[in-house]
Image: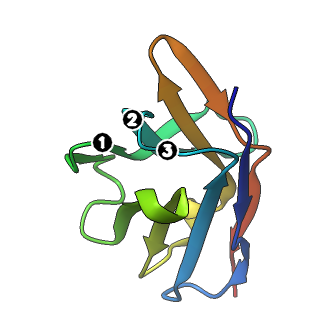
Amino acid sequence: QVQLVESGGGLVEPGGSLRLSCVASRSIFSLHIMGWYRQAPGKQRELVAVIASGGARNYADSVKGRFTISRDNAKNTVSLQMNSLKPEDTAVYYCNAVAATVNYWGQGTQVTVSS
């Protein structure tokens, strides 16, 4: 069992930056995939970025070049640096971890991009 707690969401103007963090309740060394998903009102949850235990990363086309995902196994943390934010990035962002065939989810953190 893994509990995931997100932080770092908030209100930011277009073009601004935010950094989301997700802390796991135990070592993430064995969590072979960790990532971030988001869900905007009236839309399905979608993948934003994932990172494998070996460091391979994958991003949604809509965030490539603007978002960077990283993981720190020593701190049991996965982070998402978001730059050049756009209004369409507004959503609840969820941390995700995969261990074997089990998916774990955090409670989510709201990101609002608005002037």
- Residue identifier under label 1: 53
- Mark seen at residue 101: none
Question: Given the image, on which type of amino acid does mark 3 rest?
Answer: Ile
Q: Residue furthest top?
A: 101
Q: Is residue 46 above or below residue 76?
A: above
Sequence order check, earlier mark of 1 and 2: 2
Q: Secondary structure at mark 2?
A: strand
User: In this view of the protein, which residue sits in the foreground, 98 or 13?
Assistant: 98
Q: Secondary structure at mark 3?
A: loop
Q: Position of residue 44 (x, y in %)?
A: 62, 29
Residue contact between numbered discs 1 and 2, judged by CB atoms under 8 Å: yes
Label 3 to label 2: alpha-carbon separation:
9 Å
CA gap, disc 1 and disc 2: 6 Å
- Horizontal and vertical percent for residue 48? 44, 48
Q: How is the image coloured?
A: rainbow
Q: Residue at x 53, y 60 (%)?
A: 77
Q: Amino acid at mark 2?
A: Ile
SS at circle 1: loop
Q: Quadrant of residue 73?
A: bottom left
Q: Position of residue 111 (x, y in %)?
A: 69, 66
Q: Report the disc number at residue 28.
A: 3
Q: Quadrant of residue 1?
A: top right
Residue 24 horizontal side relative to residue 36, left or right? right
Image quadrant in which you'd find residue 66: bottom left
Disc nearer the start of the sequence (1/3): 3
Residue 45 coordinates in the image, percent (x, y): 60, 33
Which residue carries the number 2 mark? 33
Tell me if 39 is positioned left or right of 55 in this view. Answer: right
